[in-house]
Image: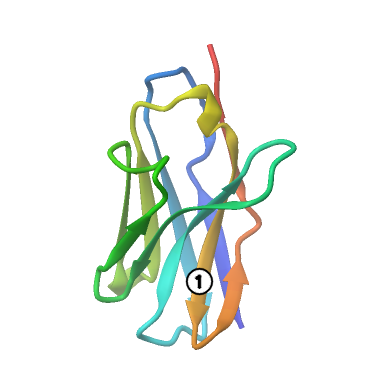
Amino acid sequence: QVQLVESGGGWVQPGGSLRLSCAASGIIFSPNTMGWYRQAPGKQRELVATITTSGYTNYADSAKGRLTISRDNAKNTVYLQMNSLKPEDTAVYYCYYVWTGMNYWGKGTLVTVSS
């Protein structure tokens, strides 16, 4: 079993920044992929960004240029630096871990962007 715990969400004004963290614990296998998805009110969950153990990244078009994913393999932690935030970035952000087709999800952290 893998447990994922997100932190760093909150309220921010448009144009502001937040940094999300997700710590994985339990039986962690490598190589693996970790990442972030988000679900806005009334919408389906969507990809934000993923990163492999070797550092290969993949971003949704909406995230490119403003959001940066990174990870610390020694700490089994993935980060999402979010800059120039927009109201449409408001969502619950979920951490994600996958290894050989086995998926795990965190409980989510709420990000609210409003003035």
Identify the residue at image location x=61%, y=83%.
Answer: 1
Residue at the far right in the pictured view: 42
Q: Residue 29 versus residue 15: which sits nearer the camera? A: 15
Label count reads 1
Residue 39 placement (x, y as % from top left): 63, 45
Q: Is residue 41 above or below residue 6?
A: above
Using a 10 Å C-alpha cutoff, classify the residue at mark 1 as few (fewer than 14 neighbours), some (14 to 19) or many (20 or more).
many
Identify the residue at image location x=61%, y=61%.
Answer: 106
* Residue 16 relative to residue 105: left or right: left
* Residue 101 relative to residue 85: left or right: right
> Which of the 4 image quadrants contains residue 90?
top right
Residue type, mark 1 in image: Tyr
Residue 76 placement (x, y as % from top left): 38, 71
Residue 47 placement (x, y as % from top left): 51, 54
Residue at the far front in the pictured view: 61
Q: Is residue 25 above or below residue 101?
A: above
Question: Element at badge 1?
Answer: strand
Residue 31 placement (x, y as % from top left): 35, 84
Identify the residue at image location x=53%, y=23%.
Answer: 87
Residue at the far top in the pictured view: 115
* Residue at the spot of label 1: 97
Q: Is residue 46 above or below residue 1?
A: above
> Which of the 4 image quadrants contains residue 58?
bottom left
What sort of colour scheme is used for the picture?
rainbow
